[in-house]
Image: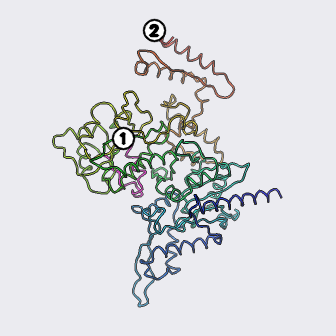
Amino acid sequence: MQGRDLVNSELDFEMELIHHLESIGGTKQWEYLPEVKTLDALWMNFRSILERNNKEKLQGTSLSDTEFAQVKKVICGLGSPYEAGRWIYGMNGVTQVEVDRDDKSDGSKGDHIFLTVFDQSNVGAGNTVYQIVNQIEHPRVLAGRKQRRFDTTLLINGLPVIHIEEKFHHHDAHEALNQIRQYIDEGQFSDIFSTVQILVGMTPDQALYMANTDSESFNTDFAFQWQREADSKPVWGWREFADLMLSIPMAHQMATNYMILDGDPKHKNLIVMRPYQVYATKRVINALKKYTFGVDKHEVGYIWHTTGSGKTISSFKTAWLASRLPNVDKVVFVVDRVALTDQTFAKYNAYDPDTDDENNNGVVSDTANTGVLAQKLRSKQSNNTIVVTSIQKLDRLCKRDSFVVPDKNFVFIVDEAHRSTNGDMLKRIKKGFPRSAWVGYTGTPVFDGDLTRQAFGDVLHTYTIREAIADGNVLGFKVDFEHTLKEAEIKDELLPKMLEEKYPNWNEKAINKKIANMSPDEVDGYIDSDLYDNNAKHVEAVVDDIVRHWRNRSKEGKYSAILTTHVGGLQASAPMALQYFDEFQKRMRNSSLSKRIL
């Protein structure tokens, strides 16, 4: 009886969510379809919308079962959430499906037509249809597994895009996500549910969202709370989460504009942006929409997001969306070191949804030298819309007597903007491109002399170390992280052991795949402090680093800093501090700096 009460309570919560989504803010939003409870009924609903949105192409004749079977084959053939994301993105934001129509009555061959499924220019408008279904019956896919019922699913133009599993009070949103993982393990996100992009686990007091993924890559560490834009405070209540993230057009934008298609050849997957990344991107794009090139001042503003918070994703999405604005001809992403150009291009290229399966023929291009840079800035080809280059190459180009300013509107997005505020290079480049708008991204603005503001304008969005620590997105007071262990030792010995303990059901192949695709920040997050505690080699390496950079980091040989020590478990940290003290004494005994340190 107790279990029955719990089920009824969860169903009541589910219906309360659905009715809230129908009229968020007192306006008509999602349309509830109480009669749709099966996959067949979902297909019929999608078919009706597809035909209604393509009346002219169908010339008044509905799709036959044979013709619609071609559409179903495409959707059911989407082998992963990443493939579904690429298909939903379509060509220049328009998703189409090819259909060979049945032969005509006179025996002639039927027409070959392209039916539009999604058009991103109609987000929240046009003929886009937003619907909700719940308790959809899913026949078992794997032998020996149960039939399933999915809680709540949001449909856009008839296709599932956001799926929500609810749990009631005294449960955790992670439980709901882990239930979704079980469905993924069983192959239930197939058939018409192949198109799901975002997963949501929800209780009355907590909501977490994450990108859809395969079973091996499923990790609730990448499930996020929503945040309020005004103060970056986390959103806990389900109603506020629904209002801010599941409303129209926000939910549609999240499942399309604010998804990243990571085409890394080693592991292709979806990435969904975090709230602060979305807010920052929106503010830049809104500022650029109102910007008048050649009239307004160059400095649009800068984004202050703390180190380790994912500025690469934010800056790419900003560059990509900016390149599609009608008043923008070129976006130039500027790094402050020539050596970073290839690295940044590789990452941007992997994120580019216009690339093919081999990450070629996209809109992002790199610059081998200044001559190539000049050529690509002049180019009218679509595959040169976003150009990745260094500030040094731009400066050399502007110094050339033969340099002719292209007749275009440029947006310059500067990475690590705090390192690009000194000297005359930025001034020369701005002068060389009079019709240009400048946006900076930095984790450490230069407030001394107001340099960052002078170079890029007012701050547009902030996400500081304080918010990042509260979110658990970065380690407390982490600014720069340097390994004192060799990379080979970490990846070949330490990480496999850690992943085996954390994921006992993973096989060796899954563990190796995870390690191969881990970013440096992910590696940092997995390295347990126990590896460093009471480790003499680590102590030596830390002291080496401090002594080696003493002159640059100190002010006239003096520090205003604290060296803290940590030992895991219940051990005291004092013995670890004494190890550092002894090592400093040993190293500095014969050094001219010894008096200043000791």
Is 344 included in the stretch rendered in magenta? yes
Residue 496 location, quadrant:
top right
Q: Residue furthest bottom?
A: 106
Disc 2: CA contacts within 10 A as few (<14), some (14-19) or many (>=20): few
Task: Say what amino acid the circle numbered 1 marks.
Answer: Val
Colour style of the rendered protein structure? rainbow
Q: Position of residue 128 (x, y in %)?
A: 49, 67
Left or right placement of residue 398 versus residue 503 in this view: left
Q: Tell me the quarter of the image containing the N terminus.
A: bottom right
Q: Which residue is mark 1?
A: 414
| Contact (Cβ within 8 Å) of mark 1 with mark 2 | no
Q: Position of residue 402 (x, y in %)?
A: 16, 43
Image position of 531 (left or right of 114): right
Which residue appears at 27% of the width and 32% of the height? 424
Name the front one of labels 1 and 2: 1
Q: Residue at x 51, y 71 (%)?
A: 73
User: Dot 2: what SS?
Assistant: loop
Instruction: Determine whether, in the image, residue 306 is placed left or right of residue 418.
Output: right
At x 32%, y 43%, the residue is 389
Q: Earlier in the sequence, mark 1 or mark 2?
A: 1
Magenta-tinted stretch = 342-366
- The mark found on residue 232 in the picture is none
The percent coordinates of residue 388 (x first, y second) are 33, 45
**Which residue is disc 2 drawn over?**
590
Is residue 184 inside the magenta stretch?
A: no
